[in-house]
Each structure stands twice: as structure tokens, then as C-alpha cells.
Amino acid sequence: MSDVIEALVEREYAFGFHSDLDTDLAPKGLDEDVVRLISAKKGEPEWLLEWRLAAFCHFLTLEEPTWSNVHHPPIDYQDMHYWAAPKPKPQLASLDELDPEIRATFDKLGISLAEQERLSGVAVDAILDSVSVATTFKAKLAEAGVIFCSFSEAVREHPDLVRKYLGSVVGYRDNFFAALNSAVFSDGSFCFIPAGVRCPMELSTYFRINAAQTGQFERTLIVAEEGASVSYLEGCTAPMRDENQLHAAVVELIALDDASIKYSTVQNWYPGDADGKGGIYNFVTKRGRCAGARSKISWTQVETGSAITWKYPSVILQGDDSVGEFYSVAVTTNHQQADTGTKMIHIGRNTRSTILSKGISAGHAQNTYRGLVKILRSATGARNHTRCDSLLIGPECGAHTFPYVEVKNDTAQVEHEASTSKIGEDQLFYCRQRGLTEEDATSMIVNGFCREVFDELPMEYAVEAQALMRVSLEGAVG
Amino acid sequence: MLHIANLRASIAGKTILNGLDLDIAAGEVHAIMGPNGAGKSTLANVLAGRDGYVVSGEATFEGVDLLALAPEDRAAVGVFLAFQHPVEIPGVGNMYFLRSAVNVVRAKRGLPEIGAMDFLGVAKEHMARLEMDPAFLSRSVNAGFSGGEKKRNEILQMSMLEPRLAILDETDSGLDIDALRIVAQGIERLRSPDRSMLIITHHPRLLDDVRPDYVHVLSGGRIVRSGDHHLAAELEANGYTSTLAAVPA
Amino acid sequence: MKAADGSVMDYPSTKEEAWRYTPVDEIVSRLAAAATMPATGTSVSRQVVDALAGDHGGPRLVFVNGVYDADLSDHDNVPAGLWCGLADLSHGRAAANVALAGIDWAVDGFLARNHADGHDSAVVVVDPGVRIDVPVHVVHVSAPDNTGERADSATISHPRTIIDVGSGSRIALIQTYCGLDGRAVTNASTTIRVGRHAEVDHCRVQTESTAATHIGHTRIEQEEGSRLRMISVTIGGDIARNAIDVHLHGPDAQTELVGVNVTTGRQRHDTVVTVDHAASRCASTQRFTGVIDDHGRGSFSGEIIVRPGTVATDAHQSNRNLVLSPNAEADTRPWLQILADDVRCTHGATVGRLDDDALFYLRSRGIPLDEARTMLIGAFIRDVTDAIPHPSLRTHVAAIIAASNGMVATDPERMR
């Protein structure tokens, strides 16, 4: 068994390169001037600057939360840059004008922007150090009435939409990191699907951290109007660095009547080295509001990266008969820590939610599921089913399951089940008796353990996620 | 082919196999019978390399020291164990699992990988003979299978992996008459001059359909009596207690 | 509040996870307003104790408002090898044991006050290698006097029970917290040490008045190979908290915790259970059930902790809640903290109402609605009531549950 643990622990990070880009950096530190500088750099309207400043004032009154089951040295919020952009930042007429170095970066990541446009039929917004550098397929999406662009562009081109929905699900008062993000967010993706439109292709944002000592604060806003539907995927990687980098993004989803949003994440930020040095602190606020009747929001996440992951993609089930889903795989190895889960807040009648969480912990890692299912008095006929399974590989790791269920309506039906066990000796022996190596057997069993979550990913990403799992878990196999 | 000498095995300080000797030549089918707790399943597990036993003595397969090999390496040299309780592996597709195993074993034998389509064709042929619904290929390994389905799945795997030494651990237990016939035919089909079999059972029924060359009675961790298939009939007629009592131990 | 070592100990706040669902502020203010009653002059008679707590054979220690009452107690027929009485009686083992239990484990202000202000402590000591066939019954009756000059203050008591079961011994214990009508505050603590290979069957029944406040804490220390089964029944109290902390110090220990809360009116019942696996090869199960009606709120917080370095842990936890009225609330918080890999842990929680199909099925067979409901509620909590090993207590509890829940009283013996 110990060989396998070693193999797991010695996994290598394939995306750890750094690209040599000329970067426009704001000075280190955070004060009102930095907030104004960011807003000015982006040529923002007055109302947005005011919103940022209000968020900043509120942020100053807050203390960093300590309730989660993760441990890290204090973060010095004055010792990082709050603005980093590859320069010059051109207004691109076409992808051909994209800085070849940036294009090479995304090619290396397997996100060939041009190829993507020609072949795969997935619209990609590429974000480098929190600044959108390229968005593909815009013309084709525009034909369908779909807006898919960088957040900055949305502020310029669709200010009314942004103003209407920004902060409507995650207000800047929500929490410490949401307040920080609201004050200093640099860019992100904006996506608007008008009433009755089924988005003709998968939308995807690719986040890449490149610059050193830089905090990453994107904001993603997706609005699906009545009867609209969209499937959206984000992927994330970062260079290997010895210091920890903070990533505090906010994602807001709004689904009106009969709308459906499927949001998938394959998160592979740099997790730090085998001794736990370096890696991304991934402190993200993600929330969706099923504002309309019969709307549906589904989160699927495969979390394999980051030194620390701290996120709870949640759904507020406001519309009657709305549906919330959360499917999660969180893999932690070496010294990684993950405290992740969801909140399902049932407000409307006959609202339904499903939570399926699979945690895998190896090495010295700590993996925590934390979830809240809340059925308010108004949520007559609400249903929730939750299952959280944890798999432990090796004696030094930990798995924690912290669910909260709060029911204030007698017609609700809530079920929670969970299990924690080590990887099955019987299963391993059975596979090995059939000729599979211990490593292959482990990988196969773990992939099987996660299968139901992978099945929720769009097809092409399910394959990617399985491959990523294999890399994460097999690491040095061979 | 298989040579076992003075094999001892204990678990948690309790001796289960206590100096067992057995030789199986190529193409022979041996049956091991014995009362509950005699050590039959332990013998199967020890030969396949399950963890947890303290083992001493000798077990070689075509001169290769089996006891020194990892379970997967024993599989590669051709040892196959049909489990008494086949393990459920949720989320892992049966076909994917089987094809991975077949290709790993083929690679170790220097054979080319078998493609998905070819594999599917062969698998379906075998399944038809075992009267298995092809839908089983897309289900998770043994997960939610009935007892009979699991046992048929073991025979399917055995057919596909083409082992040199097949150990069948109570493959007949828990089967109804029809399933028993199908499983027995499956085993009988796999009989060949270069494949040996060790059938562990405590019901002589299976041995009517798969007639062994030799029958051994295991008791107290050793083989206490050997004979041909008539011994099985004698056991069925008289029971273990009186059959064994008639023999000096 | 001061702890035994003199340090100041605060009351907990709802920010602490174990107190999340407990209305601590309300309890603290009630505690502050409550007064100690003089030991004399209560109207508690033997008939009252029999009615409230039952007579289950065996020795019975009765405390009224936290003060030992020898007249109400049955202390004559104590079997050999068993000692029970007051902490301040001069019994060598008892004294040693009190010292043992006095090791400062007060973890919050409530316990610190219990230890500091308690009047009489009940002590039960079983010598090694002794098997006691009759249950030892410790009864705490609160008899508030909310009349006359004390009309404004509730009656407070700080009952403390210390139980020490020697190696290889076996004993059954019954603890009853009951009371007369009126406002009372009971701040109770119990310590149970289960010695090597000892076996304890413990029933804790709380049936205080619906105007009472109850803060209960039971700490269980288990040594190697010991077995403990605890059945807890929470019916009474306006606000009632039942905390159970099990510490498995020795390997191969087994724990089975079973409990029910029947919550009606505006009652708030809070059950908080921690099982700490600090040794290898221990097995624990928690099965808690809540039946919540009217404006009641029932909360369950369960936690399994598996410490690093332990092996072959088997731990299971379940919490099922039946919500019977539109204004009832249920919270459940089943937690796992696993720091070793050789574990088999599961937990499950459900909140739901009576099964309409089952109700219909029963009615279609001619059973009236009320009776059908009663049958189904009875079936829901059967797991708990059936676990009570003493037939007389089983009947006693069933009758109180039936009365409190407006259920048709059904003899559990007949429904089995």
C-alpha cells in the first residue's frame, strides 16, 4: 500500500510553467487609491466606482473568517498586487492579433484558442491574471442573441444589464472575500442568455494565473432569462511558485422562469509542492439564484488543485418548483486542504435539491465537506437528498463531514447519508487478481467512486476530468 | 504445473493451512472438498496472494515461486481465482474493467492490445454462451448483481482472461439448478490440455457436471484423503464425518 | 463562573458548534433568575415519586431539588459488591471515586456551576467482577415553589451523579429527571466510568414539567473491552438540552447510544452527542429519533471523532426526525471528523412526516386516523422504546410519551 501512497504523494503538476509576458502591475498593497486606480484603468462608470468603494469601506470593517477547517499562515493583504495585466492590452479585432506569447501559453495548456474556434465548437473566454485576453465565437453567439464577453466589455457595452444583476446574488456585504472581490475585481466573464434561447454551444472560461505575488479577483455573472438555457465550464491553472497566491473570485448565477444554468468547474490551480510549499489559496464565493419558477441551477465541480480550497457553490431556490444540484469531487493529496460543499436554501414551493459529494484524501491532506440544507417555512413540499462519501488513502490524511440540516416546514422531506472508509482492500485485491497493478487498481476504483459526478460533466470535460484524476492520483506511476 | 509442498498459513495467530501438499499437472482438474472451516478458501486466497496471511512452505507454478509474486504478477503468469464472493466496484464499468485486465495480462505475455470493438465481439460471444444479457457489460463490476449473475460474471472473466491455472472457490454455492448448469458448462468448455483447474466446493453436485480427475478432502488444514470422482460420491452418501473417520488421519 | 482550578469559565455561545441550536442566552438568564429552594417543606411523597419515576426494583436514590431524601429512597436491599449513596458518606471507594470524577473536566460555565454549587452528589460504585441483576435507580425530582415570596423565581438544582463500574462488572442504571408543575432549572451532570471489560446498561429519562429548563451533560469514559448501552428519553422541559460525551480510551470498547425526543407545545429539545474514538478496534453506534409536533423545535448534533493512529474503527450514526405539524422545526447536524484511514463510518439523517401511504393503508383496514397516527408514531420510535431493557420502565416511558404527544396510550408489550 505504501508504494501507492508514495505515488499519490509524488504527483507532478503539469501546468507549472511561467510565461514571460510584459505585465502591467499596480503597486503592492490595498487602499482606496488602488480601488480607484483599478476602476480608472478599466474606464468604469461612476456608479461602479461607487459600488467598489462602498464594498471597500465595508471590507475594512470585517475580519478574516476563521470558522473553516483549514489552516494557513496569516495572509498579508498589503503584500500583494491587486492589478496585473499583460500589456499592451489590445482591442482585438480577431484572434490573429493576440499576443503570440499569450497564445502560446494557452496552447501549452491545451486551450488552443484558434483550434477551439475551428474545431471543438466551444466558445472560450481566456482570462490571464484576471484579465480577459480573448473570447472566441462571439459572432456566432451574437446571432443567437447570446452575450458572452469579458466583464470589462460588459460594463462598457451592456451597463444596464450589469448594473441590474451585479451583486444581486452575492452582495458585497456577503462575506470577507466577497467584499474584497467587490472592491478590487479586475475582470471576469459575463454571459447573458435572452429569453427563450438555448445557448447553441458550451461556453467556457479558462482562468490562468501568471504574474507573481498577485491576488486574483475575477467576477463572473451569468444571467439566463425566461426559458433560456446554458452550459458553462471553467478551467483553472497556475505556475508553480514557492509563495502562496490568493484567488478570491465571485460567481453569480441568475435563472429566471424555466431557465436552466449548468456550471461546471475543473479546478487545477497549482497545489503546492510535496512539502506543502506554495500553491493557490482558492477562496471563492459561488452562488446561484433560481429566481424564477421551474428554473434550475446545477453546479458540478472537480477540485484537484489549490493548496487550500474554500468554496461552497450554493443555490437559493426562490422560484416555485425550482431545482438546485451540487455534484462535487474534491481530491486532496500531499498537504492540500479543502473545505468545500454547498448551501441549498429552499424558499419556493416544491423546490428540490440534490447534493452528491465525493471526497478523496491522501498523503497528509485534509478534506472537509461542509453543507447546509435549509428548508424555510414557505417551502412547502421541498425535497433534498444528500450523499457525501469520503475515501481515505493512507493513515495520515483526514476526512471531515460537517452537514447542517434545518427544516421549518413539515411537508419537507430531507435525507442525508454519508460514509467514510479507506479504499477497499477487497476491491484492490480483486482488481490485482485480474492482473491490474496496484496503482491502476487504485486509480480505477477512485474513478469509479467519482463516476456519478463525472457523469454530470459535459462529455468532453468528463474525459478531461478523468485524465486529471489519473494525473492527480497516479502521479509518479510507471 | 502447480506444486504445493508443506504449505502453512495462519491469520491473526490462528493456523488454517497446516502442511498442505498438492501437485496438479497440466490439463488436470482437481477438486478440493471439505467441511466448513477446513481451509478451502484460505488455500485459494493464499495461492492468489491475498494480504493478511502469514504463509510458509512452497507453492510454485511452472517453476515460478508464486508466493514471492504480487497478486497482479500471479495473474500475469496465468493464475485466475474465481471469487467465492465476487467484489462489487461501483462506478467502474464491467467491460472497461475486463478489457483493462485482459490487456494488462496480454501485455505481460507479449501479446498486442486487443481493441475495443474486437473485445466487445469476443465478450458478447462468451456472454451468449453463459446466457448473460450484454447489458451487463455496461453495468458496474458486480454492483447490484444477483449471486448467480456474479458467479457467471466470474466465469466470463475466466473465459476472457484464458488463465493457465483456474481456481474456482465455491463457484457453485448459491446457484439455482439452471445457473449451476450454465456455470458448469462454462467451466467444462474451458477445460484444455494446457489449463489446470482447482475446484473448491463442498457440494458434490458440481462434480457431476465437471468431472474432476482427482478429488481431495481437506480437513484441519491438510489433505487427508485423495481419490477419483468416486470419492465425491462417497462423501455425498456418507458425509464428511464418517468418510473421514474411516481413514487414518 | 469559576472552574475548579479557579479560572473563570464562560457560558458557551451559540457560535460554538455544540451550542448552535441551544438558546443559551435564554437559559443563562433563567439560571440567573432562579433561586435555591430550602431542602424542607416540599410536597413530594413516595406516591409522587412512584408516579413520576416508577419503581423498577433495586435500590433507589431520590433527590428533591438537588437534596438527598432518605425517606423517599430505597436503600436497604443493596446487593453485595454494589455501593450507592451520597458523595459525602464515608465510604472509601466512593471517596476515591469522587476524587477521580473531580478531575477538572468542566468544559463550560454550566458544568463549572454544577460542580461548584451542587448540593448532594449521587455515587454508584460497583466492585470489580460483580454482576448486579437489579437496576440502580437515581431519581431527581424538581419540586418548584412558584408561590408566595418565590413567585418570581424558578427553583434551581445542580444534580450530580458519579458512577464507577469496576473491571469485569455488569450493572444496569436508570436515571430519571422528573418534576412537579412549575418553573424549575435543572443543571445536571453525570460521569460514568466503565472499567475494563465491564458492561453498563444505562437509561436516562427526562420527564420534567413543560415549564422547566434542563441542561444535562453525561460524560462517559470507557476502558478496554468495555460495553456501554445508553438509552435516553427526552420528553419534558420547556428548553431541554441533553449532551452525551463518550470517550473511548481503551481498545475493543463498544458503545451503543439510542435516544428519542418527543417535542410538542413550544418545547425546544437539543441533543448533542460526541463519540471520541481515541483507541483502536472500538465500535460505536448512535441512533437518535425525534418526534416533533406543534411549535416544537428538535435539534440533533452528533459527532464522531476518530483520532490519528487508531485502527479498525467502526462508527455509525443516524438521526431520524418525524415532523408532525406545520410549525414544528427540526435541525440535524451529523458530523464526522476522521483522522485515521482504517475506518468504516456512516451517518444518515432524515426529516420527514408520516408516510401518507402507510396512513392510508391502515385506515383502509378500518383503523381510525388518530389510532393510525399513534401506531405509526409508535412504530417510528419503537427502536428506542424497545431498547429499554426493563419492562416496567418501558411501560412507564410509553405511557408518558403517549400522554405528552396526545397519542392513544398503547401498551408497548402488546404492540411488540
Image (tube, coloured by chain):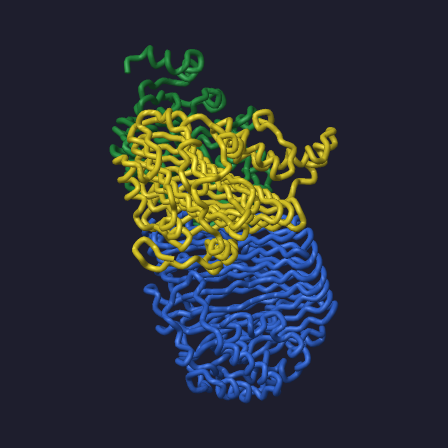
Say left or right for A94 vs A237.
right
- Residue nearest the viewer, comparing A39 with B171: A39
Q: Position of residue A352 (x, y in %)?
A: 65, 54
- Residue nearest the viewer, comparing C277 with B8: C277
Q: Is residue B121 visible?
A: no
Compared with residue C29, is residue A157 higher up or lower down, i.e. above or below? below
Give residue C195's quadrant in the image: top left
Quadrant of the snapshot with the C terminus of chain A = bottom left
Q: Is residue C209 visible?
A: yes
Most extreme residue toward the front is C148
Compared with residue C152, is residue A434 higher up or lower down, i.e. above or below? above
* Residue at the (60%, 62%) spot, across then down: A315
Give residue A286's quadrant in the image: bottom right
Say left or right for B57 vs B243.
left
Compared with residue C247, is residue A17 higher up or lower down, i.e. above or below? below
* Residue at the (49%, 39%) spot, across then down: C42
* Residue at the (43%, 53%) spot, across then down: A443
Q: Position of residue A218 (x, y in %)?
A: 53, 75
- Residue nearest the viewer, comparing A471 with C335: C335
Chain B image colour: green
- Residue nearest the viewer, comparing C70 with B7: C70
Q: Position of residue B16 (x, y in %)?
A: 31, 28
Chain A image colour: blue
Chain given the colour yellow = C
Q: Position of residue A301 (x, y in %)?
A: 53, 61
